[in-house]
Amino acid sequence: MADTNKIKYGIKNVVFFPATIAANNSATYGEAIPVPGAVSLSMDAQGDSNIFWADNIAYYTSVANNGYEGDLEVAKIPDDVLTSIFGFVADTNGVMYEPVNAPVVHFAMAFQFEGDVHAKRHVLYNCTATRPAVAGSTKTESIEPQTESMTITATSIYVAAIDKEVAKASVTPTEATQYASWLTTVYQPTN
């Protein structure tokens, strides 16, 4: 897959897939939950590099890939995400509440960046997120939209078909079959 883009811009098509993580760190995924209104995504690579010095040189260097961590900012976090990912509960009276002992829900996050030639789609396989803050401000002469953010930690899953831990994948429109289903089904490598 050749990415012919010279630049990337504009995040859109963010989708969460609730995940069940097995004892061997493999994952199965639920239905796609769209997260409209993406404003920004900034994910920093996590991991350390270690240098072993011998013979007065850097004799051996190792680098740990511990996934990614960063922030997703959206216009408003949908109620479907609050209930499916953060464990909020909508009761029979139409009230949504947040239990303090809600379990951590893992999920895959797919998204798309635009480019000068084509849009490239990505997936982070094993994410968890912090609950969004409660914030707002008064209306002044003009209405300024208030966004919501969550900090996302993305680690790997085990993919048995290739016998590897995988943290992230991406695809361009040149891979038409995978590209078309990227936002409805979590792609897992097969070779």
Image (cartoon, rainbow, N blue to C red):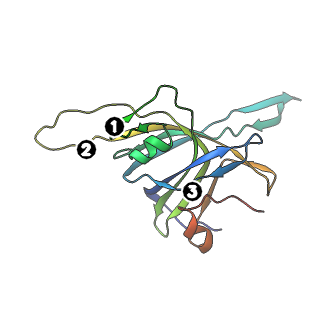
Q: Secondary structure at mark 1?
A: loop
Question: Is 101 rendered above or below residue 72?
Answer: above
**Distance in Å between CA atoms under marks 3 and 2:** 27 Å
Drawn side of residue 97 relative to residue 144, left or right: right
- The residue closer to the viewer here, 141 or 58, is 141
Image disc number at residue 23: none
Check disc 3 and report the residue beneath it. Answer: 122
Would residue 175 be visible to someone looking at this image?
A: no
Give the x, y percent position of residue 11: 44, 55
Point 83% across, 32% down: residue: 57
Mark 1 or mark 3: name the one nearer the start of the chain: 1
Mark 3 or mark 2: name the one nearer the start of the chain: 3
Check disc 2 and report the residue beneath it. Answer: 145
Point 42% across, 31% down: residue: 98
**Distance in Å between CA atoms under marks 2 and 1:** 24 Å
Point 75% across, 62% down: residue: 190
Drawn side of residue 27 relative to residue 45, left or right: right
- Identity, as a three-letter code, of the amino acid under mark 3: His
Drawn side of residue 111 relative to residue 1, left or right: left
Mark 2 or mark 1: name the one nearer the start of the chain: 1
Give the x, y percent position of residue 42: 48, 43
Most distant residue in the left direction: 141
Check disc 1 and report the residue beneath it. Answer: 95
Q: Secondary structure at mark 3?
A: strand
Q: Secondary structure at mark 2?
A: loop
- Identity, as a three-letter code, of the amino acid under mark 1: Val
State if disc 1 and disc 2 touch (CB < 8 Å).
no
**Distance in Å between CA atoms under marks 1 and 3:** 35 Å
- Identity, as a three-letter code, of the amino acid under mark 2: Pro
Would residue 125 be visible to someone looking at this image?
A: yes
Camera-near label (2 vs 1) is 1
